[in-house]
Image: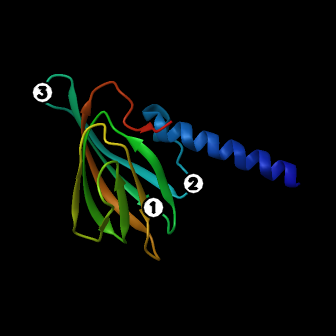
Amino acid sequence: MKTCLAIASTSAVLVSLFAFASPSYAQNAQMAGVTRTDLQRHALSVPGREVVQVRVDIAPGVVAPKHNHPGEEIVYAIEGEMEYRIEGQPPVTLKPGQVLFIPAGAKHEVTNVGSGNAAELATYIVEQGKPLVVLDK
């Protein structure tokens, strides 16, 4: 039984990491403790760019691992408390109604530091055809 649970847990982690990094699978699978809900995706008038909006829910104590995006991310905190660690910057904690700008390619991670669910509206201005989320190696 323990072996089956260990295999299932390892498989779930691998599938979750792949889903987090791959836009085609991100809609169908989720990272443990992180739920991404795609809201909209549209081409922009700037050639090769698109806007993507996603609601991201993070369970208490969960860390979305270090990653980056092929463009800018604009964060609006909906609920809870989230600590953002952007490479080269001091940590920032957002509460509902607060916003954060994450530059293109900036490696960052976010942790739900509150006692309940944390949620953000993430708006990305990114290059079309590239993965939305790139995990740090």
- Say what secondary structure mark 2 lies in: loop
> Residue pushed farthest right?
1
In primary-sequence order, the first of circles 3 and 1 is 3
| In the image, residue 89 above or below residue 115 | above
- Residue 58 badge: 1
- Place residue 32 in its image quadrant: bottom right
Q: Position of residue 16 (x, y in %)?
A: 57, 44
Write the residue at 51% across / 67% down.
61
Write the residue at 20% across / 29% down.
49
- Place residue 79 in its image quadrant: bottom left
Disc 1 crowd rating (10 Å Cα; few below 14, some 14-19, many 20+) is many
- Residue 32 badge: 2
| In the image, residue 36 above or below residue 25 | below
Q: Nearer the viewer, residue 123 or 107?
A: 107
- Residue 46 badge: 3
| Number of disc labels | 3
Left or right: residue 78 versus residue 33 is: left
